[in-house]
Image: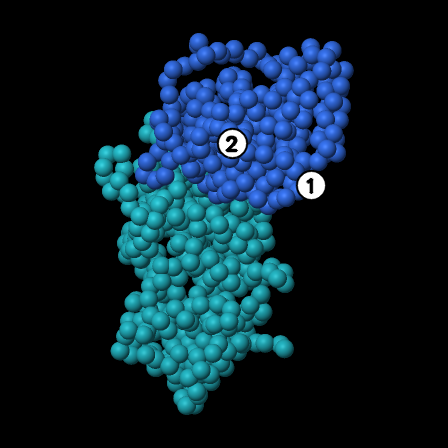
Amino acid sequence: MKMAAKTTVLNLTEEEFVHPGNRACSGCGLSILYRIGVKALGRDCIFVVPPSCLTVMQGLYPIAATQMPVLNGTFASTAAIATGVKAAMRRLGRATQVVAWAGDGGTSDIGIQALSGALERGEDIIYICYDNEAYMNTGVQRSGTTPQGSLTTTTPFSGKSEVGKNLPAIIAAHNPAYLATCSASYPLDFHDKLLKAKQIKGLKYLHVQTPCPPGWGIEEHMTVALGRAAVETGLFDLYEIEDGCLQLTGPSQQLLGKACLRPVREYLEMQVRFKACSDEQAAALQAQVDQRWAGYRDKFK
Amino acid sequence: MSKAIIESGNVAAAMAVQLARAEVIAAYPITPQTPVTEKLSELITAGRMDAEYVAVESEHSAMAVCIGAASAGVRAFTATSSNGLLYMSEQLHWAAGARLPIVMCVVNRGIGAPWSVWNDHQDAISQRDAGWIQVFAKDHQEIIDMTLKAFRLAELVHIPVMVNYDGYYLSHTYMPFEPPDAARVDAFLPAYQYKHALSPERPESLNTVTLPDARLDVNGIKRGGYMDIRHNLHEEMGMAIEVWEEIDREFQGHFGRGGAPVLDPYRCDDADTVIVAMGTMANQFRVVVDRLRQDDGIRAGVLALQMYRPFPGSRIAEALQSARHVLVYEKGLSYGNQGALYADIKSALYPYPSRPQLHNFIVGLGGREIPTESLYQTTRAACTEDRMRPPAQSDAPQWIGLQL
């Protein structure tokens, strides 16, 4: 494992790569990630973006909210477009980082084939999936990563009956050069994982849980609290996988020392989207978390 | 001394890409295109071609890689056929809208269902409105020459170009052709320069969401909306015909071949019966035309259409002004209407004073054999037919060689 940098609010660069004012909703988890993430990536990078909230957040022609070069492309082909840009950078003799930045729909559903191909070829790109757990840009429809019990406009009244895809596990099965899970509520952890990803050759995949106030049914000021609750209840774990070896990181690693975690129900009850979640579903979720964490404690004790 | 070699049409295409110094090749195998990509990966692996070969997982991704590379200012190429072309359809529209000078060979094949691996033109015809320039080669020499010219055209007008050639008839047959001299190709085809190339030094956001109306940028300069951008694509595509002719003249200066970049007429000067066709069928008709003239005293000619999009409507209409009969033979159609080429030609003739008798024939779908004898018989019958057929009947396509 490479040593991670430890960025704090005191030594985080003050340079901004995003213009003030953009089209994100207030309280958007993605806008936190984008602003802090680009600080880690620096100016020598090119973004590839499929249709997503990020497309809109970046600005509408001919005005851009971002200062970065961006190639907007079709929904299903983010990782393949990034492959082409990276191939061009190699031809031009440039070390420019190519960063694909897509949502959970663009990654776990429509874009998974192109991403799987890029993973198998070991493309030298950074792929960031900001997972707000539904198709938020089109108005909150269920996606592959939408959790069980969650209300969306295509799972109304009783919530999604199926369990969401474990996308990082699917990616991990491809043996990427680097895999990390992050949370929009821990932007400096994301920042430092990006710093690390920049040093690694091959496909680096970062999966970022990204609270979405309108989609999750939370107030704008609750974004950070929600992401923290997901981590502290043990529902969303922060970890890295390098050379096939999983290590919990930062806040999740600190939870190992605790005898018990916050109950999952606390997290669920903070959000309108889980209003239809049954007691059985909540209990099953808690049991799943308990089992996974028993495994972690066993493994890392 | 002739420098001709004998090779397959697919190898001719691969040689053109090698000579053009394309730098990023992304492709997914599909019959009958496969040997093009095999040859290119062989050339690259053997160190005879300096390029990146990306073995993608689908045609959709093949075009995505080309879109990425071309947006970053690097010359890109792919090839496909049939359902592969349809699978990348979304990307075709994207590449055209983004004004990327990508060149693609389409080895024409029927599209499923039912499955067919054999030749017709429905793949290319189905994508005629994607905003790509579409040219059709008739022989191996044209494949290699046209592909080189396609790179020049694409990069001058910033519109992607599809070089079509018939599956099996050309892709898998061996014919003599002369590969252009590499040093002269370098003089003919300068390195690709793209002023909007993705670059951290000059960051631009490409293909952003664009509103219906024009809008001022941060400097107060008015920038067109979606409709204005699309209008420019249409206008500049029309202008590409003359650019293509100019490129052909340059090519002739370098290599001594060319002279018929848009329409390639054979014995049309005095013809009152003109056959219009694309691809190898136009060459097959030369024998038919000779026989009609010799045996039947019919002054026939064949007009090969080399460029289908942009459609050279006025050039075709003018070329047909002294014809009494115009017979359009095609290997694809707009289902529920007519042959797509026939409908285009009919519409091109409408504003002109002379409107010849038009006949539409559908032939060779899914590789159905096209006997030269049946081309001869149907052409002769059409020229001598009773002119009093009701309009709806004479306007309907006739299917040749059906085995119902």
Crowd class of label 1 (few under 14; some 14 to 19; many from 20; radius 10 Å): some
Q: Residue at x 59, y 41 (%)?
A: A152
What's the chain of the residue with tag 1? A
What's the chain of the residue with tag 2? A
Considering depth in this image, is B115 or A3 the residue closer to the camera? A3
Relative vertical location of residue B317 with respect to residue B66 in this rendering, above or below: below
**In the rendered structure, which amino acid carries the disc numbered 2?**
Pro
Q: Residue at x 60, y 15 (%)?
A: A251
Relative vertical location of residue A2 with respect to residue B111 in this rendering, above or below: above
Left or right of residue B360: residue B118 = right
Residue B395 visible (yes or no): yes
Q: Residue at x 36, y 65 (%)?
A: B264
Left or right of residue A127: residue A144 = right
Question: Chain B in the picture: what colour?
Answer: cyan
Sequence order check, earlier mark of 1 and 2: 1
Residue B307 visible (yes or no): no
Question: Which mark is on residue A161?
Answer: 1
Q: Secondary structure at mark 2?
A: helix
Name the residue carrying label 2. A213
Percent coordinates x, y for residue B261 in the rendering = 34, 59
Considering depth in this image, is B364 or A9 the residue closer to the camera? A9
- Between the residue at mark 1 and the residue at mark 2, the CA separation in whole angstroms equals 22 Å
Left or right of residue B216: residue B163 = right
Question: Chain A in the picture: what colour?
Answer: blue
Residue A209: name its quadrant. top right
**In the rendered structure, which amino acid carries the disc numbered 1?**
Ser
Considering depth in this image, is B125 or A160 the residue closer to the camera? A160
Percent coordinates x, y for residue A129 in the rendering = 54, 31
Crowd class of label 2 (few under 14; some 14 to 19; many from 20; radius 10 Å): many
Q: Residue at x 63, y 19 (%)?
A: A232
Residue A264: name its quadrant. top right
